[in-house]
Image (cartoon, rainbow, N blue to C red):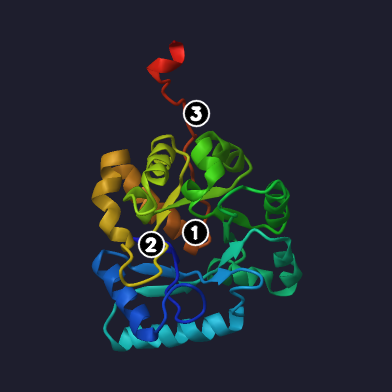
């Protein structure tokens, strides 16, 4: 399994606070069946601004410690970039925000309360650089909770959609959990990732049974292995045709 969204690097954002914590996160992931994990520290102007150079130094240090500890897992680098126009000021280094520095896929997050109008233009600006945006944990955005179908327009524009294991399990509340299940059942999500922040976060492999109950084992393996593996290897990601979500009408609306 391949986990493309984690905060395993120590002391760079709101994730791991030590190398020991990072190793514990790696160990839990490996035990759950993950063989490739992506370190995606936040890039958020004014808050989390660790350089890509420092990220790479920390990733190398973590790889060495994991090998010494006997943890068999490949660590790949990436970023979770906030949808902010300032990101394009890093043009000379822009490809290093992408997975494995390959310039193919970029993990992006939107403000939780509202997907801003400028996001569609930013998606286009990323794509003209030859990069496919992967929109992180969409099930947690208020706009998507109100209307899951708005994700369709981003899929039509070529984006990939990622949801969190914690959302599937109800960690963020019943509304977010319900939205995650809707997106999965209506082919409005392409990848599931852990978004691990601590060693207490559920690793990717622990959600296999729950996912299988929602979409079946074949689709589950695409969500947690085939598609994310294609991302970290820089290959095209086949995606299913999304289905329109039609909410059930409450009986009292007819009165």
Q: Earlier in the sequence, mark 1 or mark 2?
A: 2
Classify mark 3: residues with Cα within 10 Å, few (<14), some (14-19) or many (20+): some
Picture coordinates of residue 54, whole percent (x, y):
57, 84
* Secondary structure under the numbered disc 2 in the rendered image: strand
Q: Quadrant of residue 157?
A: top right
Q: Nearer the viewer, mark 1 or mark 3?
A: 3
Q: Earlier in the sequence, mark 1 or mark 3?
A: 1
Picture coordinates of residue 50, whole percent (x, y):
59, 79
Q: Earlier in the sequence, mark 2 or mark 3?
A: 2
- Badges 1 and 2: C-beta atoms under 8 Å apart? yes
Picture coordinates of residue 65, whole percent (x, y):
36, 87
Q: Nearer the viewer, mark 2 or mark 3?
A: 3
Q: Quadrant of residue 67?
A: bottom left
Classify mark 2: residues with Cα within 10 Å, few (<14), some (14-19) or many (20+): many
Q: Is residue 214 above or below residue 7?
A: above
Residue at the spot of label 2: 2
Residue at the spot of label 1: 231
- Badges 1 and 3: C-beta atoms under 8 Å apart? no
Work out how far the residue at label 1 is from the one at label 3, CA to CA, in angstroms: 26 Å
Work out how far the residue at label 1 is from the one at label 2, CA to CA, in angstroms: 9 Å
Q: Residue at image x 60%, y 43%?
A: 154
Left or right: where does residue 60 sit relative to residue 173? right
């Amino acid at each position: 399994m391949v986990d493309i969204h984690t905060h395993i690097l120590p002391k760079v954002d709101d994730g791991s606070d030590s190398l020991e914590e990072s190793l514990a996160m790696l160990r839990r992931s490996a035990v759950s069946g993950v063989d490739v994990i992506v370190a995606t520290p936040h890039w958020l102007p004014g808050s989390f601004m660790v350089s890509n150079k420092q990220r790479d130094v920390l990733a190398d240090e973590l790889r060495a410690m994991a090998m010494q500890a006997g943890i068999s897992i490949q660590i790949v680098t990436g970023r979770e970039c906030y949808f902010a126009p300032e990101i394009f000021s890093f043009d000379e280094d822009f490809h290093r925000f992408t997975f494995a520095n390959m310039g193919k896929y970029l993990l992006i997050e939107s403000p939780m309360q509202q997907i801003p109008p400028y996001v569609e233009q930013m998606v286009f600006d990323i794509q003209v650089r030859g990069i496919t945006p992967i929109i992180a944990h969409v099930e947690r955005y208020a706009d998507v909770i109100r209307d899951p179908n708005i994700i369709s327009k981003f899929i039509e524009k070529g984006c990939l959609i990622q949801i969190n294991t914690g959302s599937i399990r109800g960690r963020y509340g019943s509304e977010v959990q319900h939205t995650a299940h809707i997106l999965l059942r209506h082919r409005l999500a392409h990848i599931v990732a852990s978004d691990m922040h601590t060693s207490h976060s559920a690793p990717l492999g622990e959600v296999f049974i729950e996912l299988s109950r929602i979409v079946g084992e074949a689709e589950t393996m695409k969500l947690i292995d085939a598609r994310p593996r294609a991302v970290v290897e820089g290959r095209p990601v086949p995606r299913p045709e999304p289905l329109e979500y039609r909410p059930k009408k409450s009986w009292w609306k007819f009165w």
